Image: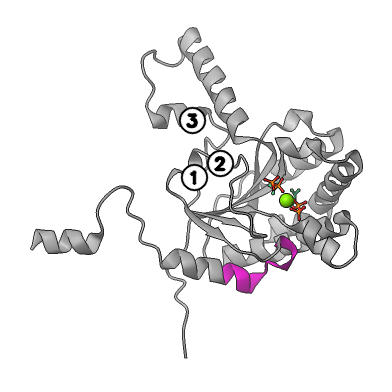
Amino acid sequence: MFEADFSVVPRHIAFIMDGNGRWAKARGQERVQGHFAGTQAVIKVVKHAFERGVKYVTLYAFSTENWKRPAAEIDALMSLLVRFLQEHENLFLDNKIRLETIGDLSALPEQVRAGIADLKEKTADFEERTVVVALNYSSRNEILNAAKNYAAAVAAGTESSGTPDWPTFSKYLYTEAIPDPDLIVRTSGELRLSNFLLVQAAYAELYFTRVLWPDFDERELDAALIFYASRERRFGKISEQIQKKTDL
Ligand code: IPE
Ligand code: IPE
Ligand code: MG
């Protein structure tokens, strides 16, 4: 029988959780019901990813562009988030998962910020596993913000002047303490990054599936992991096999 090999797993998987609205529409339901179903998928996927040995899971939950949606949908998304943080606190505590966020939290409703601050504090000492939630996130804003803060540090003399190298500049990104994603998964058949981790994705493997996010489960994650294990990551070098032949 075919035995899947899960010995090579990405250290960091980032998910563009797309298709909640279409999932609901296909069932004659309201979009918000799709978002609720999406939170159920989050639980399954997060648990399974860590069981497979992944260390960081990033979830794109709300983009800066998502403010363009109807107010009722935005409110529902924010309420779902607050509820999720309250009701699934044990997912984090029992599995020793640290909560991190990327994005501009200052524009989020007070209740959301409070819920996040609370769970961040409770999970701050966990080191093995991290869930990063991208909230009011925009990759372009992240870069602009980093440039601004870097320039301010140079002006203040806390950062040396001259051309920055990437390790120095990247410390000013929201992802300062988070390694780059090895694998980016987007559900729902869209083939785009939608302003998500644009610079961190420099050498990520990209996996696109037509499955809608609420239907993405352990099996679908395994399929993405099998895809990942089959890739040869060269980081600009030539294939190892060819290199070996050249060395002979
Ligand atoms: C993704 O599902 C969730 C968020 C962007 C918050 P969508 O709401 O984008 O679902 P579709 O793309 O309309 O199906
Ligand atoms: C990307 O999905 C954002 C999130 C998953 C939070 P969107 O549904 O907002 O992306 P576009 O508009 O189809 O590019
Ligand atoms: Mg969408």
Q: Position of residue 231 (x, y in %)?
A: 40, 63
Magenta stretch containing residue 218, yes or no? yes
Q: Position of residue 141 (x, y in %)?
A: 62, 28
According to the image, what is the colour scheme of the structure?
Answer: one colour
Question: In the drawing, does residue 43 fall left or right of residue 225?
Answer: right
- Answer yes or no: is residue 195 visible: yes
Residue 57 in the image: above or below residue 49: above
Q: Could you classify mark 2 by the number of other residues whose Cα lies within 10 Å: few (under 14), some (14-19), or many (20 or more)?
A: many
Type of the residue with mark 2: Leu
The residue carrying mark 1 is 201
Type of the residue with mark 1: Ala
Q: Secondary structure at mark 1?
A: helix
Q: Tell me whether circle 3 and circle 1 mark residues in contact (CB < 8 Å).
A: no
Q: Secondary structure at mark 2?
A: loop
Magenta stretch? 213-222
- The disc placed on residue 197 is 2
Depth check, front residue: 56 or 69: 69
Q: Quadrant of residue 73?
A: top right
Q: Position of residue 78 (x, y in %)?
A: 84, 43
Question: In the drawing, does residue 207 fall left or right of residue 83?
Answer: left
| Foreground label between 3 and 1 | 1
Residue occupying the point 79% across, 36% down = 67
Type of the residue with mark 3: Lys
Q: Tell me whether circle 1 and circle 2 mark residues in contact (CB < 8 Å).
A: yes
Q: Is mark 1 within 8 Å of ligand 2?
A: no
Mark 3 / mark 1, whichever is N-terminal: 3
Residue 90 in the image: above or below residue 230: above
The residue carrying mark 3 is 171
Residue occupying the point 45% across, 10% down = 157
